[in-house]
Image (tube, rainbow, N blue to C red):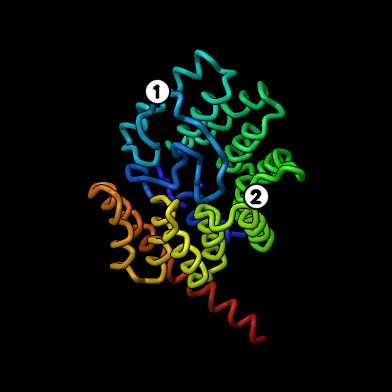
Amino acid sequence: MTRTFFTFAAERHFWIKALCGVVLPISLASCATSTPKSDRITTGSIPTQTQSLNFGKPLEQMTAAELAQAEQTAGNAYERSPKDKTIGLAYANVLRMTGKNTQALAVMQQVAIAHPSDRDVLAAYGKAQAAAGQLEQALATISRAQTPDRPDWRLYSAEGAVLDQLGRSDEARQKYKLALESQPSEPSVMSNLGMSYVLSGDLKTAENYLRSASKLPTADSRVRQNLSLVVGLQGRFSEAEQIARQELSQTQANANVTYLRSMLSQQNTWAKLSDNRSAKADNATN
């Protein structure tokens, strides 16, 4: 099953894998990666363009069958024009959406060779590296894409997401705050910041950021689905289900809810969060 919500020693690896990467299935609508105006992925925004391939609708709203068709369309276009920036970015984006991170990285390597100084390409390359588990390399690539004289808030947010996955939450939050200074009340950044607090077990702070982000007019379903996850992690399953079902089709919402319940049950996630918070409290009083 392809997972989408949320573009995260042993316990830390669990949190990174379960919460900061992508969690819910993609037959729904995801932390997916393309909107008509700009990519607002909730775990590190990096711009990608897919309009020229005429997919018909945003990738995050596609079913598995539609994503398969989009992958074929983008793959055919890439085969014809492997050096085309827009096509390469779109193809890598679709591949990540379908869980083919290694192939997406290979595509971005080729695009980066053809466009070695392009900021969008470097940013997307860093994102592909992160998705493939090459976190330190991703951090270096994204940093190369950033320019001090013309900083890009999306790159700050993406850098923060990678830092969170490396367990460097304080540094990550500084990056998110820099992004928000440049782009106040940007829901994707606020969502990233909220998920950063999930990783450290501070669910109330996480919920506050995600709830604020979800109320913004530019917030999309991915932000609200992250909110659904955080509410569910606190044991409020009915409320989590209600949030998950607000704007998805019945089939998509059922898939999200089923996966959420399965993830929380199988991984004993709530118990892990409670233990993590208890340990923090004990350390604070010693």
Q: Quadrant of the C terminus?
A: bottom right
In this view, which residue lies farthest toward the right? 149
Separation of marks 1 and 2 at Cα, in angstroms: 32 Å
Question: In the rendered image, which residue does mark 1 sit on?
Answer: 72
Farthest top residue in view: 80
Depth check: give the residue in front, 278 or 194: 194
Image-based side of 52 in relation to 132, left or right: left
* Of labels 1 and 2, the one closer to you: 2
The quarter of the image holding the N terminus is top left
169 up-or-down from 24: above or below: below
Amino acid found under the numbered disc labelled 1:
Gln
Residue 219 location in percent, x, y?
44, 53
State the image quarter where residue 168 is shown. Answer: bottom right
Residue 117 vs residue 232, the one in the foreground: 117
Q: How many marks?
A: 2
Which mark is drawn over residue 156? 2
Give the residue furthest to the bottom: 285
Taking depth in this image into account, of 136 and 160 the one nearest to the observer is 160
Quarter of the image for residue 130 reads top right
Please tell me which residue is depicted at 57% across the width and 20% down the height of the picture. 84
Lateral position of residue 75 relative to residue 145, left or right: left
Task: State which tag comes first along the sequence, 1 or 2.
Answer: 1
Taking depth in this image into account, of 243 and 162 the one nearest to the observer is: 243
* Residue at x 28%, y 47% (from the top left corner): 252
Q: Position of residue 43 (x, y in %)?
A: 53, 50
**Element on which disc 2 rests:** helix
Q: Which mark identifies residue 20?
A: none
Vertical placement of residue 78 versus 268, above or below: above
Decide: is 229 above or below 122. Answer: below
**What residue is drawn where x is 54% and y is 58%?**
185
Question: In percent of the image, x 42 and y 69: which residue is there?
Answer: 270
Residue 224 screen position, x and y as percent: 40, 57
